[in-house]
Amino acid sequence: MRIAIKQIEAFLAVAEHKSFSAAARHIGVAQPALSTTIRDLETELGVRLFDRTTRRVELTQAGEEFRASSSKVLEDLGHAVQNARDLAARRRGRIRIAAPPLLSSTIVPWAIAAFQREYPGITVELLDAPAQDIREEVLSSNADCGLGTFSAHEEGIERTVLMRDNLALFMPADHPLAAAPYVRWEDMATLPLIAMARSSGIRRLMELGAESAAQVLRPKFEASLVTTALAFVGAGLGVSVLPTYALSRADQLDLVARPLVDPTVSRDLCLIRASGKSLSPAVSSFITVLRNHVQGRIPS
């Protein structure tokens, strides 16, 4: 079936005005063109829609039924067009972002608050998930995007880099190494170390840095969460190698961080989405706000 919107609009105009000439003036077309449009519509439907006389135009029974359903079609189409325009203009929408616990409790809530002040009609949902689960949340469409550290070679995802972060040594503010502007890997060889669990990407980066510096690190404790490692450091149980963004929580424990050098080990903090899936206008705007908050709240 090939019925055009202009045919339905023409039909409804005639039905409302009960006159071809009045309907033609209302929609701004010539009367012969309007008559041809209605005739083509009737041919396509295989039914007569109007009874025409020299004095009046009346809907047939089929015309009455078609009027009710076609009016609904145009109304629904109008709502669909307005909804699409609202989405494009960021007046409405929904975002669901998956982020690891530390970022979910430090940076992301402030980014959401700033975003909703600018776009109050857009709903933002936060899924705080283990770092190793975030990619799957995105691939399964349970989240529109994910935040964390992801390899550029991972299949199924596309990355937007928000910032580059370096590994640093976290310690109490009164620790002897806190007086130095930076720490070498060899400086921590004899210190009690709180390391992330072996499944952690941070742990793998730490081991890579130590190996590059020809050091062998033997952790005294292991932690699955960055917040747990920070708590151990705050309790005076040792030092920990963590990304700089952990400073957003370390200040509460009177901890400081010093860059680890020789070598400097970096990683990209990224926002990911499923490959081939376009960014909605809402997500595109949220990325801008999130990047500003990440860069503003994480020391370089």
Image (spheres, helix red, strand yellow):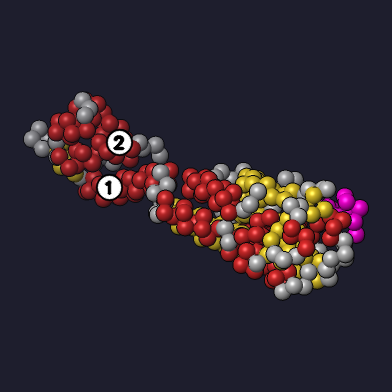
Nearest to the observer: residue 253 or residue 28: 253
Q: Is residue 212 magenta?
A: yes
Compare marks 1 and 2 and give the one earlier in the sequence: 2
Reading the image, the residue beneath label 2 is 7
Position in image of residue 60 (x %, y %): 20, 45
Magenta-tinted stretch:
207-216
Question: Residue drawn 52% across and 55% down?
Answer: 111
Position in image of residue 253 (x %, y %): 65, 69
Question: Residue drawn 65% across and 67% down?
Answer: 254
- Tag of residue 179: none
The reply to whether residue 280 is visible in this rendering is no
66 on left or right of 135:
left
123 on left or right of 203:
left
Reading the image, the residue beneath label 1 is 71
Q: Is residue 287 above or below residue 186?
A: above
Nearest to the observer: residue 142 or residue 50: 142
Residue type at mark 2: give it. Answer: Gln
Position in image of residue 240 (x %, y %): 76, 63
Nearest to the observer: residue 198 or residue 190: 190
Residue type at mark 1: give it. Answer: Ser
